[in-house]
Amino acid sequence: MSKGTHPLNEVNPGYWGGGYIKGGPDSYLKVSLTNSTYIGEMTITKFDLANEIVSGTFWFDVQNPWTGEKIEVREGRFDTHFSQ
């Protein structure tokens, strides 16, 4: 992991966006992930090894597994600790 912008797609291993989407006739949860059609980007703005903190922003598109419609996730942000 490094500072900079990373594509969220099935071409860049280890980097993807997605989430659980609730729907269908029984309100099931299904996972929908970025791929070569539904893409996104993650920008790491802070990567502090000494304090084990990573921060950044993201956006991505995924497909609704029931309707096929595009779901747009925009202006995402993260600030988290990690362990080495």
Image (cartoon, helix red, strand yellow):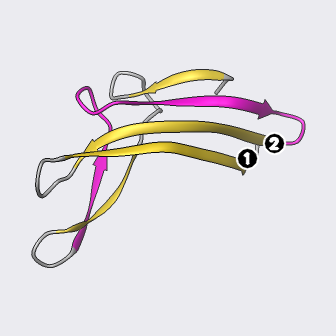
Q: Position of residue 53 (x, y in %)?
A: 78, 42
The answer to whether 28 is drawn above or below residue 50 in the figure is below
Q: What amino acid is labelled 1 in the image?
A: Phe
* Magenta residue check for 27: no
Percent x, y for residue 23? 20, 69
Task: Tell me residue 45's x, y (percent).
Answer: 70, 29
Quadrant assignment, res 51: top right
Q: Earlier in the sequence, mark 2 or mark 1?
A: 2
Query: How many residues crowd mark 1 within 10 Å: few (<14), some (14–19), many (20+)?
Result: few
Q: Which residue is mark 2?
A: 52
Instruction: State which quarter of the image contains the C terminus.
Output: top right
Q: Amino acid at mark 2?
A: Glu
4 on left or right of 16 = right
Measure how far apart labels 2 and 1 are at the Cα level: 5 Å
Residue 18, above or below 47: below
Nearest the viewer among 17 and 70 is 70
Q: Residue at x 28, y 50 (%)?
A: 32
* Label 2 close to label 1 by CB (< 8 Å): yes
Please tell me which residue is depicted at 12% across the width and 58% down the height of the picture. 66
Main secondary structure along the magenta-highlighted residues = strand
The magenta segment: 28-52
Judging from the image, what secondary structure is the residue with disc 1 in? loop
Of all residues, the one furthest to the front in this rendering is 75
Which secondary structure, mark 2? loop
Which residue is found at the position 32% from the left and 44% from the top? 33
Query: According to the image, label 1 marks what residue?
Result: 82
Q: Is residue 47 above or below residue 11?
A: below
Q: Residue at left 28%, top 43%?
A: 62
